[in-house]
Amino acid sequence: MSCRKYPELEGRVALVTGSSRGIGRAIAVRLAREGARVVVNCRSSTGAAEAVVREIEDAGGEARLCVFDIADAEAVKEGIEELVKELGAIHILVNNAGVTSDNLLLRMKEEEWEKVVKINLAGTFNCTKAVLRGMIKQRYGRIINITSVVGEMGNAGQANYAASKGGIIAFTKSVAREVASRNITVNAVSPGFITTDMTSSLPEDVKSKMLESIPMGRYGEPEEVAAVVAFLASDEASYITGEVIRINGGLYM
């Protein structure tokens, strides 16, 4: 694939969770463009994930599909063990997969809370723990966790989502301290409102209100998030760890 900015990513294995669409898809495509061997992960959207693999391969990149539920610790462990056997190592992990289940707190059911925290926060824990031993052994790793502006500033009706994404920030900083001496960096990327299927389906009045709160006056694009992830995965970011990089058009400063 042409137009490579970070040639050192050539041949490195990158696992991107939840990469069948949206931000995850953009990250997978960008890392493949940089020469990484990309593992496209999903839980159930296999058709969309296979389309991402074909997109990467058609552009001259290397990709494969790996299906597992990040909330299932045993499935994650087994899936990553198989990947390491097949591909030799995992050099880059992008914890992108996540869900929402919005409701005001007084109306929020326990299962709505537990589902979001289990997938978003526990899923990040499961995947990070499963790759970490190998990264420590090879004395190299890049872990990039996708959090959210909501995890920093909060949002009415999203107490579960905000808690899970805020937890990812604290998790990022703690793990970064644990593994920094092993040449492993752990950082978080915090997008604001990004153009995805979810935001595109919102009513026009809601979208207009959102835009009014963004100083730059526009939504971000998935490719803009992917560009920051590619930088954090590169050697140019080798002295950056435990950081939260915001991509939100000034929504939260």
Image (cartoon, grey):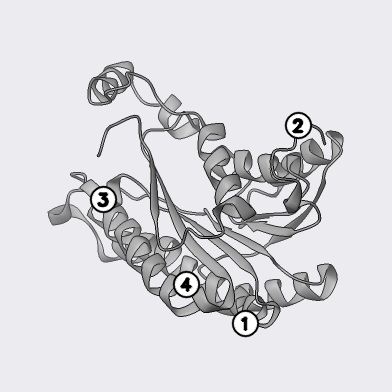
State whether residue 71 is above or below residue 145.
below
State the residue at coordinates (51%, 39%).
225
Chain-order first, disc 1 or disc 2: 2
What numbered label is drawn on residue 133? 1
Coordinates of residue 40 in the picture (x, y in percent): 69, 52
The kind of residue on which mark 1 rests is Arg
Q: Looking at the picture, does residue 242 appear above or below residue 228? A: below
Q: CA distance from mark 2 to mark 3?
A: 34 Å
Q: Which mark is residue 3?
A: 2
Which residue is disc 4 drawn over?
Answer: 125
Of callouts 3 and 4, which one flags the residue occurring earlier in the amino acid sequence? 4
Q: Which residue is labeled 3 in the image?
A: 152
Query: Can I make out residue 18 in this image?
Result: no
Q: Residues within 10 Å of mark 3 (few under 14, many from 20)?
A: some
Q: Residue at x 50, y 31 (%)?
A: 197
From what the image shows, is residue 237 above or below residue 88?
A: above
Cα–Cα span, label 3 and label 1: 30 Å
Q: Earlier in the sequence, mark 3 or mark 1?
A: 1
